[in-house]
Image (tube, rainbow, N blue to C red):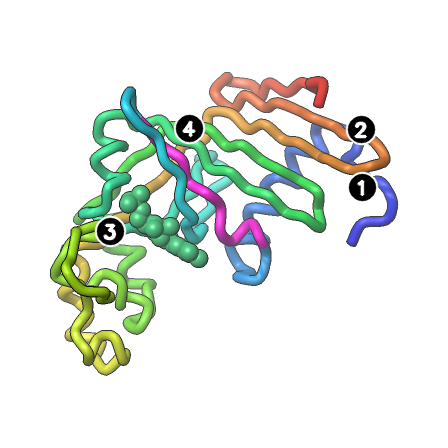
Amino acid sequence: MQKNKPDYYNDLDKVYLRIWELFKLGLKDRNLPFHIPVFICGNKDKSNGRIVVLRGVDENEKKIWFHSDIRSNKIKILKSNAKAVLLFYDKNEKIQLRVSGYTKINYQNHVSQKSWGNTAHLSRQCYLGDKAPGTKVSIPTSGLTTEVDNLKYTKEESEIGYKNFCVIETYIESIEWLYLAAKGHRRAYFNLNKKKLEKKWLIP
Ligand SMILES: Cc1cc2nc3c(=O)[nH]c(=O)nc-3n(C[C@H](O)[C@H](O)[C@H](O)COP(=O)(O)O)c2cc1C
């Protein structure tokens, strides 16, 4: 828990560095709130948010990514509008981030192949159902066989899930940072789309 003001409190460069630090810490530590942002996308008619697990961070390419099922509803939405937002909040850091960018769906390419290869076979469980996520069913069910439900499958058997697996990268265009603390709020905006990073303070 922070008692004093952090060293980035009045320093935009330090704020920006801290943002990438928080992404990287969230990537590694499943107990940190930055591990599970809300991914929001939409089209003309509807928008929706859902929790995802942060699976990769690339500061040089300014992108972050998560894994998903190619049959899920968000894929249809992203195909009609590739723009999306990832929303992060860390209560201890007192930081909210609104990360906006455009997405790329990696399916059956070298990116998805690499991530799938690094995915432990028991973690592949959610890609082993016959039915697409969100399919209407007449009984309550996980959609998995009893064996898969009980994690009784081999690595070889888990390979079939690759056909449902994709990696959704978000190429970051801008980040809105909010530090909300009783001792004085701060808000900042970073445009990563320019040749030189554009950074400015906003009224919180
Ligand atoms: C803790 C947690 C982690 C999740 N991680 C992911 C994830 O990494 N990728 C994903 O597609 N869905 C993940 N989900 C499920 C989504 O929140 C969502 O229910 C699912 O992707 C279907 O969303 P859609 O119908 O909007 O496509 C996670 C849910 C929870 C509660």
Q: Secondary structure at mark 1?
A: loop
Q: Secondary structure at mark 2?
A: loop
Q: Is mark 3 within 8 Å of ligand 1?
A: yes
- Frontmost residue, 162 versus 39: 39
Label 4 vs label 3: CA separation?
20 Å
Magenta stretch: give its range: 33-42
Specify whether 89 is left or right of 149: right
Q: Residue at x 21, y 75 (%)?
A: 148
Residue 112, compared with residue 18, is above or below; it is: below
Tell me which numbered mark, 1 or 3, is placed earlier along the sequence.
Answer: 1
Graded by Cα atoms within 10 Å as few (under 14), some (14 to 19) or many (20 or more), the crowding at tag 3 reads many
- Given the image, on which type of amino acid does mark 2 rest? Asn
Q: Residue at x 36, y 36 (%)?
A: 48
Which of discs 1 and 3 lies nearer the camera? The answer is 3
Please name the residue that numbered disc 1 is placed on: 6
Please name the residue that numbered disc 3 is placed on: 69
- Given the image, on which type of amino acid does mark 4 rest? Gly
Furthest-bottom residue in view?
Answer: 152
Label 2 vs label 3: CA separation?
41 Å
